[in-house]
Image (cartoon, rainbow, N blue to C red):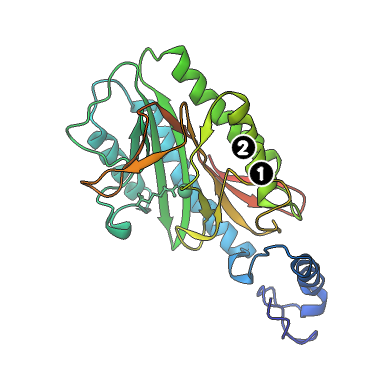
Amino acid sequence: MSGKIGRNDPCWCGCGKKYKVCHEAFDEKIARFQSEGHIVPSHAIIKKPEEIAGIRESAKINIAVLDYVSEHIHAGMSTEEIDRMVYERTTAMGGIPAPLNYEGFPKSVCTSINDQVCHGIPSEKEILKDGDIINVDVSTILNGYFSDSSRMFLIGDVSEEKKRLVQVTKECVELGLTEVKPWGFLGDMGQAVHDHAFANGYTVVREIGGHGVGLEFHEEPWVSYNSKRGTEMLMVPGMMFTIEPMVNMGKPDIYIDEENDWTVYTEDGLPSAQWEIQVLVTEDGAEVIAY
Ligand code: MF3
Ligand code: CO
Protein backbone atom coordinates (compact mmCIF):
# COMPACT_ATOMS: atom_id res chain seq x y z
CA MET A 1 0.00 0.00 0.00
CA SER A 2 1.49 3.33 -0.97
CA GLY A 3 -0.63 5.43 1.40
CA LYS A 4 0.56 8.46 -0.53
CA ILE A 5 -2.64 9.28 -2.38
CA GLY A 6 -4.37 12.47 -1.17
CA ARG A 7 -7.94 11.97 0.06
CA ASN A 8 -9.24 14.20 -2.70
CA ASP A 9 -7.05 12.69 -5.43
CA PRO A 10 -8.58 10.27 -7.92
CA CYS A 11 -8.74 6.72 -6.57
CA TRP A 12 -6.04 4.28 -7.73
CA CYS A 13 -8.71 1.90 -9.01
CA GLY A 14 -9.47 4.14 -11.98
CA CYS A 15 -13.18 4.60 -11.16
CA GLY A 16 -12.83 8.39 -11.49
CA LYS A 17 -14.09 9.06 -7.96
CA LYS A 18 -12.12 10.65 -5.12
CA TYR A 19 -9.92 8.31 -3.10
CA LYS A 20 -11.75 9.16 0.16
CA VAL A 21 -15.09 7.95 -1.17
CA CYS A 22 -13.68 4.90 -2.95
CA HIS A 23 -10.78 2.73 -1.73
CA GLU A 24 -9.47 4.72 1.25
CA ALA A 25 -11.30 2.69 3.91
CA PHE A 26 -10.40 -0.50 2.03
CA ASP A 27 -6.70 0.39 2.08
CA GLU A 28 -6.88 1.24 5.78
CA LYS A 29 -8.43 -2.12 6.53
CA ILE A 30 -5.66 -3.89 4.62
CA ALA A 31 -3.04 -1.81 6.45
CA ARG A 32 -4.48 -2.95 9.79
CA PHE A 33 -4.04 -6.62 8.81
CA GLN A 34 -0.50 -5.83 7.66
CA SER A 35 0.35 -4.18 10.97
CA GLU A 36 -0.81 -7.36 12.70
CA GLY A 37 1.84 -9.26 10.74
CA HIS A 38 -0.26 -10.68 7.90
CA ILE A 39 0.80 -10.92 4.26
CA VAL A 40 -1.40 -8.56 2.23
CA PRO A 41 -1.96 -8.08 -1.51
CA SER A 42 -0.53 -5.14 -3.47
CA HIS A 43 -2.83 -2.97 -5.61
CA ALA A 44 -1.27 -4.58 -8.71
CA ILE A 45 -3.09 -7.88 -8.12
CA ILE A 46 -6.47 -6.36 -7.26
CA LYS A 47 -8.52 -6.56 -10.46
CA LYS A 48 -10.63 -3.64 -11.57
CA PRO A 49 -14.15 -4.14 -12.99
CA GLU A 50 -13.04 -3.61 -16.59
CA GLU A 51 -10.23 -6.14 -16.17
CA ILE A 52 -12.58 -8.66 -14.58
CA ALA A 53 -14.91 -8.30 -17.57
CA GLY A 54 -12.01 -9.01 -19.94
CA ILE A 55 -10.88 -12.03 -17.91
CA ARG A 56 -14.44 -13.43 -17.92
CA GLU A 57 -14.43 -13.29 -21.74
CA SER A 58 -11.10 -15.13 -21.83
CA ALA A 59 -12.50 -17.74 -19.44
CA LYS A 60 -15.49 -18.37 -21.72
CA ILE A 61 -13.05 -19.68 -24.32
CA ASN A 62 -11.17 -21.73 -21.73
CA ILE A 63 -14.40 -23.38 -20.59
CA ALA A 64 -15.62 -23.99 -24.15
CA VAL A 65 -12.30 -25.64 -25.06
CA LEU A 66 -12.50 -27.96 -22.04
CA ASP A 67 -16.12 -28.77 -22.91
CA TYR A 68 -15.00 -29.63 -26.44
CA VAL A 69 -12.20 -31.85 -25.13
CA SER A 70 -14.63 -33.64 -22.81
CA GLU A 71 -16.88 -34.47 -25.77
CA HIS A 72 -14.06 -35.80 -27.94
CA ILE A 73 -11.51 -37.44 -25.66
CA HIS A 74 -11.36 -41.24 -26.00
CA ALA A 75 -9.16 -44.30 -25.72
CA GLY A 76 -6.89 -44.79 -28.73
CA MET A 77 -6.29 -41.09 -29.36
CA SER A 78 -2.88 -39.51 -28.87
CA THR A 79 -2.27 -36.57 -26.55
CA GLU A 80 -1.02 -34.77 -29.68
CA GLU A 81 -4.62 -34.91 -30.94
CA ILE A 82 -5.78 -33.21 -27.73
CA ASP A 83 -3.16 -30.53 -28.35
CA ARG A 84 -4.49 -30.01 -31.88
CA MET A 85 -8.09 -29.71 -30.65
CA VAL A 86 -7.07 -27.15 -28.04
CA TYR A 87 -5.05 -25.09 -30.52
CA GLU A 88 -7.80 -25.15 -33.14
CA ARG A 89 -10.74 -24.43 -30.84
CA THR A 90 -8.91 -21.66 -28.97
CA THR A 91 -7.73 -19.81 -32.08
CA ALA A 92 -11.12 -20.29 -33.81
CA MET A 93 -12.66 -18.30 -30.93
CA GLY A 94 -10.01 -15.58 -31.21
CA GLY A 95 -7.85 -16.68 -28.30
CA ILE A 96 -4.22 -17.75 -27.93
CA PRO A 97 -3.25 -20.89 -25.97
CA ALA A 98 -1.20 -19.47 -23.08
CA PRO A 99 1.12 -22.49 -22.65
CA LEU A 100 2.44 -22.32 -26.24
CA ASN A 101 6.04 -21.05 -26.01
CA TYR A 102 5.51 -20.08 -22.37
CA GLU A 103 9.02 -20.31 -20.91
CA GLY A 104 9.81 -22.66 -23.76
CA PHE A 105 6.82 -24.99 -23.32
CA PRO A 106 6.40 -26.53 -26.79
CA LYS A 107 2.63 -27.22 -26.93
CA SER A 108 -0.76 -25.55 -26.42
CA VAL A 109 -1.95 -27.60 -23.44
CA CYS A 110 -0.64 -29.79 -20.63
CA THR A 111 -1.82 -33.42 -20.67
CA SER A 112 -0.82 -35.42 -17.58
CA ILE A 113 -1.65 -39.13 -17.39
CA ASN A 114 -1.71 -41.42 -14.30
CA ASP A 115 1.59 -40.89 -12.42
CA GLN A 116 2.30 -37.68 -14.32
CA VAL A 117 1.52 -34.97 -11.77
CA CYS A 118 1.43 -31.99 -14.15
CA HIS A 119 3.06 -30.35 -17.20
CA GLY A 120 2.75 -33.44 -19.38
CA ILE A 121 3.73 -32.56 -22.97
CA PRO A 122 1.35 -33.78 -25.69
CA SER A 123 2.95 -36.30 -28.03
CA GLU A 124 2.07 -38.37 -31.07
CA LYS A 125 3.61 -41.34 -29.24
CA GLU A 126 1.41 -41.13 -26.17
CA ILE A 127 -1.86 -42.99 -26.77
CA LEU A 128 -4.74 -42.90 -24.27
CA LYS A 129 -5.67 -46.37 -23.12
CA ASP A 130 -8.53 -47.97 -21.26
CA GLY A 131 -8.21 -47.32 -17.51
CA ASP A 132 -6.11 -44.14 -17.76
CA ILE A 133 -6.88 -40.99 -15.84
CA ILE A 134 -5.74 -37.75 -17.47
CA ASN A 135 -5.60 -34.10 -16.52
CA VAL A 136 -6.09 -31.64 -19.38
CA ASP A 137 -4.89 -28.18 -18.29
CA VAL A 138 -6.10 -25.40 -20.58
CA SER A 139 -5.05 -21.74 -20.39
CA THR A 140 -6.15 -18.94 -22.70
CA ILE A 141 -5.11 -15.40 -23.56
CA LEU A 142 -7.79 -13.10 -24.99
CA ASN A 143 -7.04 -9.40 -25.49
CA GLY A 144 -4.20 -9.76 -23.00
CA TYR A 145 -6.40 -11.35 -20.30
CA PHE A 146 -5.57 -14.81 -18.94
CA SER A 147 -7.73 -17.73 -17.89
CA ASP A 148 -6.60 -21.10 -16.55
CA SER A 149 -8.50 -24.23 -15.51
CA SER A 150 -8.15 -27.97 -15.76
CA ARG A 151 -10.25 -31.10 -15.49
CA MET A 152 -9.69 -34.82 -15.07
CA PHE A 153 -11.04 -37.31 -17.57
CA LEU A 154 -11.60 -41.04 -17.06
CA ILE A 155 -10.69 -43.12 -20.10
CA GLY A 156 -12.90 -46.18 -20.51
CA ASP A 157 -13.09 -48.57 -17.60
CA VAL A 158 -11.16 -46.98 -14.71
CA SER A 159 -10.43 -48.80 -11.43
CA GLU A 160 -12.48 -47.83 -8.35
CA GLU A 161 -9.25 -46.75 -6.64
CA LYS A 162 -8.35 -44.25 -9.35
CA LYS A 163 -11.96 -43.04 -9.67
CA ARG A 164 -11.99 -42.30 -5.95
CA LEU A 165 -8.74 -40.31 -6.26
CA VAL A 166 -10.25 -38.21 -9.05
CA GLN A 167 -13.50 -37.68 -7.12
CA VAL A 168 -11.82 -36.76 -3.82
CA THR A 169 -9.52 -34.29 -5.62
CA LYS A 170 -12.58 -32.58 -7.10
CA GLU A 171 -14.12 -32.42 -3.63
CA CYS A 172 -10.88 -30.86 -2.31
CA VAL A 173 -11.20 -28.02 -4.82
CA GLU A 174 -14.88 -27.49 -4.05
CA LEU A 175 -14.26 -27.50 -0.29
CA GLY A 176 -11.40 -25.04 -0.79
CA LEU A 177 -13.76 -22.81 -2.75
CA THR A 178 -16.17 -22.57 0.20
CA GLU A 179 -13.32 -20.95 2.18
CA VAL A 180 -12.76 -18.17 -0.37
CA LYS A 181 -14.20 -14.93 1.01
CA PRO A 182 -12.92 -11.42 1.63
CA TRP A 183 -10.90 -10.82 4.80
CA GLY A 184 -10.11 -14.49 5.21
CA PHE A 185 -6.71 -16.01 4.41
CA LEU A 186 -5.44 -18.23 1.64
CA GLY A 187 -4.42 -20.67 4.35
CA ASP A 188 -8.11 -21.18 5.24
CA MET A 189 -8.59 -22.54 1.74
CA GLY A 190 -5.27 -24.42 1.73
CA GLN A 191 -6.00 -26.24 4.96
CA ALA A 192 -9.49 -27.25 3.77
CA VAL A 193 -7.96 -28.76 0.63
CA HIS A 194 -5.20 -30.54 2.51
CA ASP A 195 -7.40 -31.90 5.30
CA HIS A 196 -9.88 -33.49 2.90
CA ALA A 197 -7.09 -35.15 0.88
CA PHE A 198 -5.39 -36.33 4.07
CA ALA A 199 -8.65 -37.67 5.59
CA ASN A 200 -8.99 -39.84 2.49
CA GLY A 201 -5.49 -41.26 2.83
CA TYR A 202 -3.90 -39.08 0.15
CA THR A 203 -1.12 -36.50 0.09
CA VAL A 204 -0.80 -33.09 -1.58
CA VAL A 205 2.23 -32.09 -3.63
CA ARG A 206 4.18 -29.39 -1.78
CA GLU A 207 6.56 -27.94 -4.35
CA ILE A 208 4.01 -26.91 -6.97
CA GLY A 209 1.00 -24.77 -6.18
CA GLY A 210 -1.52 -22.37 -7.61
CA HIS A 211 -1.06 -18.74 -8.52
CA GLY A 212 -2.61 -15.38 -9.05
CA VAL A 213 -3.89 -15.07 -12.62
CA GLY A 214 -5.70 -12.66 -14.93
CA LEU A 215 -3.38 -9.89 -16.06
CA GLU A 216 -0.52 -12.39 -16.37
CA PHE A 217 -0.43 -16.18 -16.64
CA HIS A 218 1.26 -16.51 -13.26
CA GLU A 219 1.03 -13.62 -10.80
CA GLU A 220 1.42 -13.18 -7.07
CA PRO A 221 0.55 -14.88 -4.81
CA TRP A 222 1.95 -18.38 -5.00
CA VAL A 223 -0.79 -20.61 -3.56
CA SER A 224 -0.02 -23.57 -1.30
CA TYR A 225 -2.42 -26.40 -0.43
CA ASN A 226 -0.40 -27.49 2.56
CA SER A 227 -0.99 -24.25 4.44
CA LYS A 228 -2.70 -23.54 7.75
CA ARG A 229 -5.88 -21.64 8.56
CA GLY A 230 -5.18 -17.98 9.41
CA THR A 231 -1.87 -17.89 7.51
CA GLU A 232 -0.77 -16.89 4.00
CA MET A 233 -2.09 -13.87 2.09
CA LEU A 234 -5.18 -11.95 3.15
CA MET A 235 -7.99 -12.36 0.58
CA VAL A 236 -9.62 -9.10 -0.54
CA PRO A 237 -12.28 -8.34 -3.17
CA GLY A 238 -10.76 -8.21 -6.66
CA MET A 239 -8.07 -10.83 -6.01
CA MET A 240 -8.04 -13.70 -8.47
CA PHE A 241 -6.17 -16.98 -8.17
CA THR A 242 -6.33 -20.69 -8.95
CA ILE A 243 -7.23 -23.61 -6.71
CA GLU A 244 -5.36 -26.50 -8.32
CA PRO A 245 -4.05 -29.06 -5.84
CA MET A 246 -2.15 -32.05 -7.11
CA VAL A 247 -3.35 -34.95 -4.98
CA ASN A 248 -1.25 -38.12 -4.84
CA MET A 249 -2.54 -41.60 -4.03
CA GLY A 250 0.79 -42.39 -2.35
CA LYS A 251 3.64 -40.21 -1.17
CA PRO A 252 3.79 -36.47 -1.95
CA ASP A 253 7.29 -36.68 -3.45
CA ILE A 254 7.84 -35.81 -7.08
CA TYR A 255 10.60 -35.53 -9.70
CA ILE A 256 10.93 -33.69 -13.00
CA ASP A 257 11.59 -35.48 -16.29
CA GLU A 258 15.27 -34.99 -17.09
CA GLU A 259 14.79 -35.16 -20.83
CA ASN A 260 12.12 -32.51 -21.33
CA ASP A 261 12.68 -30.58 -18.07
CA TRP A 262 8.90 -30.08 -17.72
CA THR A 263 6.88 -33.16 -16.89
CA VAL A 264 6.44 -33.85 -13.20
CA TYR A 265 5.98 -37.45 -11.98
CA THR A 266 5.23 -39.04 -8.62
CA GLU A 267 8.38 -40.52 -7.12
CA ASP A 268 6.58 -43.74 -6.11
CA GLY A 269 4.87 -44.21 -9.49
CA LEU A 270 1.37 -44.09 -7.98
CA PRO A 271 -1.32 -41.98 -9.68
CA SER A 272 -1.89 -38.27 -9.09
CA ALA A 273 -4.97 -36.19 -9.87
CA GLN A 274 -5.60 -32.47 -10.26
CA TRP A 275 -8.55 -30.21 -10.89
CA GLU A 276 -8.08 -26.48 -11.34
CA ILE A 277 -10.52 -23.62 -10.97
CA GLN A 278 -9.96 -19.89 -11.36
CA VAL A 279 -11.63 -17.89 -8.58
CA LEU A 280 -12.39 -14.21 -8.00
CA VAL A 281 -12.77 -12.90 -4.45
CA THR A 282 -15.94 -10.77 -4.42
CA GLU A 283 -17.47 -8.37 -1.87
CA ASP A 284 -19.42 -11.19 -0.26
CA GLY A 285 -17.69 -14.43 -1.21
CA ALA A 286 -16.27 -15.89 -4.38
CA GLU A 287 -17.09 -16.19 -8.07
CA VAL A 288 -15.81 -19.10 -10.14
CA ILE A 289 -14.36 -17.60 -13.31
CA ALA A 290 -13.27 -20.84 -14.98
CA TYR A 291 -13.87 -24.49 -14.15
N1 MF3 B 1 -1.61 -24.37 -16.64
C1 MF3 B 1 -0.54 -24.55 -15.71
C2 MF3 B 1 -0.99 -23.96 -14.39
O1 MF3 B 1 -2.03 -24.27 -13.97
C3 MF3 B 1 0.70 -23.88 -16.17
C4 MF3 B 1 1.46 -24.66 -17.08
S1 MF3 B 1 2.83 -23.80 -17.60
C5 MF3 B 1 3.05 -24.55 -19.08
O2 MF3 B 1 -0.37 -23.16 -13.77
F1 MF3 B 1 3.95 -23.89 -19.70
F2 MF3 B 1 3.39 -25.79 -18.84
F3 MF3 B 1 1.93 -24.50 -19.73
CO1 CO C 1 -2.78 -22.75 -13.03
At x 41%, y 56%, the residue is 141
Where residue 126 appears, as percent x and y from the top left, is 22, 31
State the residue position of label 1.
189
Residues at marks 1 and 2 touching, judged by CB atoms closer than 8 Å = yes
Instruction: Classify 49 as above or below 147.
Output: below
State the residue position of label 2.
193
Mark 1–mark 2 Cα distance, whole angstroms, equals 6 Å
Q: Secondary structure at mark 1?
A: helix
Where residue 288 appears, as percent x and y from the top left, is 61, 44
At x 24%, y 46%, the residue is 258
Q: Is residue 49 left or right of residue 121?
A: right
Instruction: Name which residue type carries label 2.
Output: Val
Q: Secondary structure at mark 2?
A: helix
Q: To which quarter of the image does residue 65 belong?
A: top left
Q: To which quarter of the image does residue 21 belong?
A: bottom right
The answer to which of 138 and 17 lies nearer the viewer is 138
Instruction: Classify 41 as above or below 235.
Output: below
The answer to which of 113 and 75 lies nearer the viewer is 113
At x 57%, y 52%, the residue is 241
The answer to which of 250 and 235 lies nearer the viewer is 250
At x 35%, y 47%, the residue is 90
Instruction: Name which residue type carries label 1.
Output: Met
The answer to which of 222 and 64 lies nearer the viewer is 222
Q: To which quarter of the image does residue 220 belong?
A: bottom right
